[in-house]
Every structure is written in structure tokens, then in C-alpha cells.
Amino acid sequence: MKYIHVNLKRFDIQRALGGVNDYALSEKKDWAQSIMVQLNATINQFSSLDYQFVFYLPEAYILTAQAAKSVQSPIKIGCQSVFRHDTFEDGNIGAYTTMRPASAMTGLGVHDTIIGHSEERAAKLNFLRQVSADDDKNLQAIHDDLQAGIQMAQHANMRVLYCVGESAAVRDDGSWKDVIKAQLNFDSDKINLHNLKIAYEPIWAIGPNRPVPDGNAIEAVAAYIHELIGADIPILYGGGLKETNAQEIAGLPDIDGGLIALTNFSERIGFYPDQFIDIAKKYASGVASHEKI
């Protein structure tokens, strides 16, 4: 099984408001709906026996996206992280204003979530730094919070894509193994590691004008992750699966897929369904060519 997952972040924000959404739609809710409708015509060229597709959406679009998918579509709709508490704890009936409990998501038919994305980690760290300058304590608090979120998701029978990765400073000082190990240091009584997928995010390489990691660098980290948690746990490349790197990523022995966000990085920057299909096809051709070797 190969995994092509999509994190649509807040790509719903209109371009006029500083975002990347330039769909000419009558209603803003049609953004994710339009994406699903366009993919209905093309996504079935990939067998659900060979490929798992998950789209992680802002919460407001989950129902319209689910309704727009064709019955045959292999795409699953996921949410962007879940809260560290839930209604099945201590009899709480749902006093979680602004939060996203796993039970609320499964109640909507959502069974996939992405947790620990670098943007989520950065937001938590920036908040904690307003209270404490001790980053060792701050990072441990973030880890505990994310572990609790994974625990809630797994309790609700959700599938979790958990993101790990190192910053530029960590990559430069050579301590990346320590950081990755700490991010995967879970309490086995709380977390079922073998029910996770891992996304490796080289944070030092994400964004414009950043260095492009070569296959050897990605493979070294992926191999180390497998060394820590077992060879049977899927690892996705979370630094951005693109047409330019899809075939190389497909050939890395410890990588089982990739995470896509933007599909176009020039001029009309954004996510476009036809370009997503092109990336998936390029990845699939890379998988096929390496299987023949």
C-alpha cells in the first residue's frame, strides 16, 4: 500500500484576502466541494487496493466534501488534529467550545486526522514562550499535548498521521536524531505505535528559498524512524510531494508515500486538482519503475 495524503491547510481563504483560493464560486462552502467534484472524474484511475488518499480539510468543509465525493472515490476526508480531551473522559458532555474532540469528528463520519504538523507545533511553541523561556519544558509540554491528542483519536478508532521533523538549527548542529527520537518517545500504555502513520517533515527545507533535501537525506531519517518504531509502520515524506520529486521519493525504500499541500509554486500559487493528479501519476510511475528493478 502507498499513501498520498493532502493537507489543504487554510487554502480556502480567497486570494483577495491574502489566501490562495481563486475559484470563482457562488458560495464559499463550494471550495472543497469543487475540488472533490473535479477529482471524481480522474481519481479512480488509482486502485484503492494500492493507494490510500486522505484529504485533511478545515472543519467547515468536511460535510460538503463528503457529499461531493462519488461513491466510487477512494478519497477519505480527514480533519486537522483533534483535542487532547473528549466526552468519554470523566463524564464530560461536550464543554469544548472552539475545540475539536475526536468524538465530534467520528460523529461526522471522519476517521482520519493529522497531528503534530510543524505549523501546529510552531503555534503551540510560540504561545508557550509567552509564559516560559525554557524550551525544554515547552517542547515536552507540546509532546504531551500531542500524545494526548493521538490517544483520543485512537480511542475513537481514528487513523492518525503523526508528523515529526527537525528545524534548520537542529539540522545544522547535527542533533536531528535526538529531536526525532524525542518526538517519537511515546508511552506505550497510551499510544499504539503500530496504528500510526508517520510523516517526516524536514522543516529546514519547507518554504520558498529553502534548500531541497536530496533522497539520501530523506532516506537516512526515514531509516532511523523505522529503527526506532519498527519497519512495518508507514512513513510519508512530509516535505511536499511534487512533480519534481515524486519519482525520486517513490524510489526511497523506507518511504511509503507523500504529503501534498500546494501543487503550484509559481505565479498562481495554490492547490489545483489537475496538478494533484499529475503528481500522483508521477509518483505511481516511479513506484512502478522501481518495482520492475
Image (cartoon, rainbow, N blue to C red):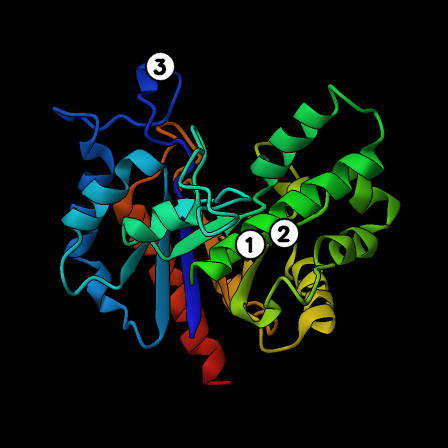
Q: Which residue is mark 2?
A: 147
2 displayed left or right of 254: left
User: How far is disc 2 from disc 3 in space, using C-alphas?
Assistant: 35 Å
Query: Of the numbered discs in the image, which one, if any, rests on residue 17?
Result: 3
Q: Secondary structure at mark 2?
A: helix
Question: Does residue 242 appear anywhere in the picture?
Answer: no
Along the line of sight, the residue nearer the viewer: 96 or 216: 96
Relative side of 133 to 87, left or right: right
Q: Are marks 1 and 2 in contact (CB under 8 Å)?
A: yes
**Marks 1 and 2, Cα distance to the nearest angstrom?**
5 Å
Residue 238 rendering spot, x and y as whole percentages: 55, 52
Q: Nearer the viewer, mark 3 or mark 1?
A: 1
Disc 3 crowd rating (10 Å Cα; few below 14, some 14-19, many 20+) is: few
The kind of secondary structure element at disc 1 is helix
Q: Is residue 242 left or right of residue 11?
A: right
What residue would you read off at disc 1? 150
Up/down of 121 relative to 48, above or below: above
The residue at the point 19 percent across, 58 percent down is: 42
Say which amino acid is labelled 1: Ile
The residue most toward the top is 16
Image quadrant containing the N terminus: bottom left
Farthest residue, direction bottom: 293
Q: Nearer the viewer, residue 45 or 72?
A: 72
The disc labelled 3 sits on which kind of residue?
Leu
Query: Residue 26, position in %: x, y?
Result: 12, 24
Residue 35 location in percent, x, y? Answer: 23, 43
Horizontal placement of 186 versus 88: left or right?
right
* Point 36% across, 57% down: residue: 111
Discs 3, 1 touching: Cβ within 8 Å: no
Q: Earlier in the sequence, mark 2 or mark 3?
A: 3
Say few, some or many: other residues with alpha carbon within 10 Å of mark 1 (under 14 / 14 to 19 / 20 or more).
many
